[in-house]
Image (tube, rainbow, N blue to C red):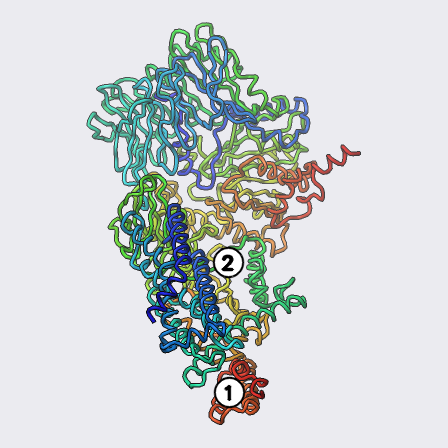
Amino acid sequence: MRPFLPPAPRQRLAFGLCLALLGAGAPYSGTTGAQSAGLDLAIRKEGSRKSAPRLPRSAFLTPSNLVDVRLSPDGRHVAFVHRSDAGQSLWLLDSATGNRRRLLRRVETKVLHWSADSNWLFLESQHQLLALSIVQKPGSGVLTLVGRPENRFVLGVDRTRPSSILVSEEIHIPGILRPSGYRVHRLTPGRPPRLLLESKEAIMDFLPGAAGTPSFAKIAASSLIAVRKVDQNGDMADIFRCAPLEQCQLLSSPAAGDLLLTGDEGGNLERLIRLDRSGRRHEIHQDPDHVADLAEVTIDPISGRALFAAYRSGSVHTYPLTAEMRVHAASIRAGLGKPGFGIAVGRGKRAKWLVTETGDRMQHARWHLYDPKTRQLREILGDLSAGAIAIPESAAARRMPFRYRGSDGFLLHGFLSLPPGAAPRRLPLVVNVHGGPWAHAPAGYSKIAQFLTNRGYAVFEPNFRGSTGHGRAYRMAAGADFGNGRVQADIVDGTRFLLAHGIGDPERVGIIGHSFGGYATLLGVTFSPDLFQVGVALMPPPDFGWTLQWQVESSRKRPARGLDMRRMLRQMNVDLNDPTLLARLKAESPLANAARMRRPLLIVGGGADRNVPIRSIIDYAARLNMLGRDISLFVDPAAEHRIDGRGPEEQYLFMLGRMLGAHLGGAREEMLSCDLGKSLRQGLRLANALLFDRHCADAVTRRADKA
Amino acid sequence: MLDLFKAEIFRFRVWIAGYFLLHCGLIAFYGRMIDLLQLPTMIVKGITAVYLLSGLLFGLHQMSHYRRPNRWLNLLHRPVAPRQIAGALIGAAMVAIGVAIVLPMIIMLTAQDLFSARVVDQRHWMLPAATFLSVFAAYLAAAYVILGVRRYAWLIPILLVFLGYSEAIGIGVIAIQALIVLWLCFLVMSAFQPAVMQVPARPVPLLATALSVQMALYLLLVTAGGLIFQVGWIMIGTHPLNGAPPEGGHVEASGARSSDLLMAGLARRHDQQTRIWREQVRLSDPLKIQPGFAALPARGEMTNMMPIMFDDEERAVRWTFSHDSMRFEGRSLRNGTRHGSLGLSASNRSFAQPPATFDDGTTVNARTFARFEPKLERMSPRINVPAGETIATRPQPVGDSVALLTDKALYLYDREVLDFGDEAFPARQRIRLSGRIGDLSRIDFIELLDGYLLSQTFGRWSSEGGSDGVQHLEKVDGSGKVIPVAQRALSNDFPAPSRFHHIWLSPVLQQVYHMVTNLFAPKAPLQARLPPRIPNIVWLTAIALNLLSAIATFWWTTRSRLDRTRRLGWTGASAAIGLPAFLSLCLLYPLRRNRV
């Protein structure tokens, strides 16, 4: 039984690799989608707010100082990892009194797991899994090493045992490319590991059954995922085949032989399903608005029943699934003033529940304890989380979900953010395109959107067709039209839709994006120069077809946990064996049409990028530079397919601010510190003067202080 | 003779015993800490130098004691032939060397072989013999310095450089040392005569003495002359290695940034494609590879260039390569016991050639790069190059690839080849070298969208008589097809007389030197070079110098009042050998003395 979905970061990663070929976005949130009337109302509301002060760049980069917060199954404790300048430490909060005590002074933990009996904490870090007794039982210490190169991964806590955790293992013979087998072990502090399952096929998840009841395993077989019932002897039988490209999440076994899982098999939207012991499928819940895929499920830690379901596409809604929960959901909604929240339920005499509050204007989450007896919410850890919040909600922009019709009549989704208190018609408009393409716009709180709105830009984030989060039909609607075709038209149509509705100055429109979003940026400034005056592309593939081929060729020999990338692409209608498709993608690529690109363009590349090789970016930039175009190129030699670390992130925001400011008429971005300025100059292979400063911020400050 | 031999041993008994004890003590002390048989060649050379110095000092001391006129008379005026007297003294010296230097080594080898799990190969048993011959040669050279004519005898120890410069390995080393010892023995015996300080009169000893002096003079002139020339040039301040190097030369190319070198290679092309390449070079981080190994370990060589061993830290086992079993032999670091043999792959087959090892447990021999897998306790081959090729570098990550250089080609692999081997990840590209590996200075390249733009620069030894420098530019496409792009001749930064001074000084002695140093040497594929193009000026200089030497020799021999045969012989020798022959004549037959 799993409290949240998806249950483990490892599985999210595997899913991300499968779908987001060029980089995926994060889960998103928003408010109820609206047609133009609703959007107008929301815009008027934003216009009536007080203007936000200009905030320093560093404010947008402040990380949360609560790494993970988890409620014990008995609801009596909250364990959390606190990050400070001195490092990370592990703490325990008594849910009744609110008292906190430090358990460990220094930890590297990224994820916490509570044992079923609430007596043990399992601390998962990048390289090891530790057990820590909170009731002073013997056995605390390292349980096992995890991650690469040990090829062991934490699956989750074993709810059928008081103090056990499940770990999967790939069996690798050194020098042999493919794993020779897969295993699942049960680890219990103070006891030797117990092998629960062994298979030649990749075991992606495992749900052990209580004594005498069957277990369930999720097995990856080539391009499909199968759910299998495992009997006492370890024999497996298929009980469910997930739809192509679908990740079925095993949640719990609420009754012997029953299984709760998620999937979109037999429908469009991802929803909550129960498989009974005879293998029949029962739909438990799906989005009542028929818009969003299921995002989270809360499971009862004792019974394994589903208690809440949350949807986060466009708007955030959390629905109670039982009559008991209905009452509590109403209380929590009233307490938070929001229809959506994350929740973990504790069971016991003095149990409290942990409620997670997030929002599009909240830089970091807030945590509350809910008392099911009094139905009162009490904020916890506020003093700790407040220190990391550098963007007050009053200064943050709302992210308004809206829908628009593409030029072919297809109903599309997107987000709009406006600087508070500004008249939208005069604002420069920036289109921020998400990566993937089989991902979705990074909703909820967005660093980039908040930075840009704070600098005075309206920000449009399209969820073009092909994006995830809105069902199978939406995701598949793009077909393979990823050249200058339907997908790009969705982005252009959305931009024109907003301009037509008086949002943004048509003479001051820019386009930016990461990965596939960067590709769309290149397409935008190449084929729609009348619309987009400037582009900023982060790790963009200049030829989508070539990059996919390169990736498939690179990954052909590297098995990705049983899933074959070429087959998965074919399921997405992108057949890399189709020469016509490849020829079309090439002909419509920014690379083949470099001569048409006449707008100022900044490209940021990663020297160690294994998704978009730097060679492809340099080839494209060289051609543009030879043609005399206004092209700037920054290469971070150590960067992979993302900007990682505060320094590089601030450099990126600086360049973004300078480029947009210079070409869309915004304010000039403040100079960088001396160190960052120096490394920026080193990384700029091609640059016009606006990205350089003769002086740096530290030196200017020192001179001012002297004076 | 026997009495003299015994007396000589008795005379040095304390020194011999003292040296023996000290030597044993040092060997025991260091042998506890390290495996002395696995010392790298550089250290072994240092230790050998100490041994040679011991031999030299002993020879000087022993012979200078008897060389005083009264003692010499006493020594020689016995009812024993001078040859037997010499035999007694030299025999005593051999015993002294054997006891003081060789015996401790034999004790150490025996003890290590019998009482430890450390590797003792057959090749190691040659070490005492090789050491003995080296030290004995030094002793003989020193003895000759004392016994021979002082004007030229001091040159003879220079010939000991052949001990160090020889390319022979294993039993070949012993053979070379034995030849040198025989040669020196002959010289010493010919000088061991009642009338000291006289140039040998008989033709064979005279020929041996003259040739020895000429070769020593040649080596001295080549080394000292070259050094003085270079130092003088540096002091003037126009030496190519001073400040900015000459434009378009090999010195500039070898020190250039990769991007500058690629740009220089493209300089003469002006087409559209070249313009794009120039832009790409400017924007890229070019990658560079240089030859890594001058040679790889060879089976039977007495010492290792570097220790062939690595540690399995998990099991606390040290794996040392044995040339006998051609496998690694394990020894526990905890208790010193044996821990089995480690061959290649699961079948534990023996290595075809001894490998070089690195700290991370990887090994490279001529054809195979392998990695130790601690989990399996197995040495797994990762990359095999085709037969007839020799690996010249460790695989190294470059860009999104792994590069491996052999004596014939550059191979580019996916990075995963290091983990999963070249069966799963065969070479993506094979780029044939445009010249010989021994001449290769560097390879520079940038990644293109569909391959690489690659520069190969040759002429590594052009300043020291190697072939001329040249840069080849090629485009390599995704399938590995190589398309020539440009070729640039690199100018010689050093004048021909400087580059080829070892030739014009004496082409004959240069050939003799080359022949002797390569005698019994195995093939060295990583040192393969193109024969240099020797400018005519070098040959003209050599001919002119030989002619001048012959004329000067004729004049000198006339003034020295040598008989006609010798005069013609010396003049002919000077015409063939050149300046060293004339100088040796001056030392053997100085004018002033002859006048007297």
Q: Amino acid at mark 1?
A: Ala
Q: Is residue B271 above or below residue A22?
A: below
Q: Quadrant of residue B409?
A: bottom left
**Which sits in the foreground, B292 or A541?**
B292
Q: Is residue A129 above or below residue A531?
A: above
Q: Amino acid at mark 2?
A: Phe
Q: Which residue is mark 2?
A: B445
**Which sits in the foreground, B434 or B102?**
B102
Provide residue A169's location: percent of width, then percent of height: 32, 34
The circle on residue B57 is none
**10 Å neighbourhood of mark 2: few (<14), some, or many (≥20)?**
many
Q: Which residue is mark 1?
A: B575
Q: Mark yes or no: residue B542 visible.
A: no
Sequence order check: which comes first, mark 2 or mark 1?
2
SS under mark 1: helix
**Which sits in the foreground, A101 or A12?**
A101
Q: Which residue: 66% across, 37% down?
A: A673
Work out which residue is located at the far right of the displayed protein and give it.
Answer: A707
The residues bearing labels 2 and 1 have C-alpha atoms spaced at a distance of 51 Å
Provide residue A530's location: percent of width, then percent of height: 62, 45
SS under mark 2: strand
Q: Quadrant of residue B189?
A: bottom left
Quadrant where the image shows the C terminus of chain A: top right
Q: Mark yes or no: residue B495 visible.
A: yes
Task: Name the subunit of mark 2.
Answer: B
Provide residue B145's location: percent of width, then percent of height: 48, 72
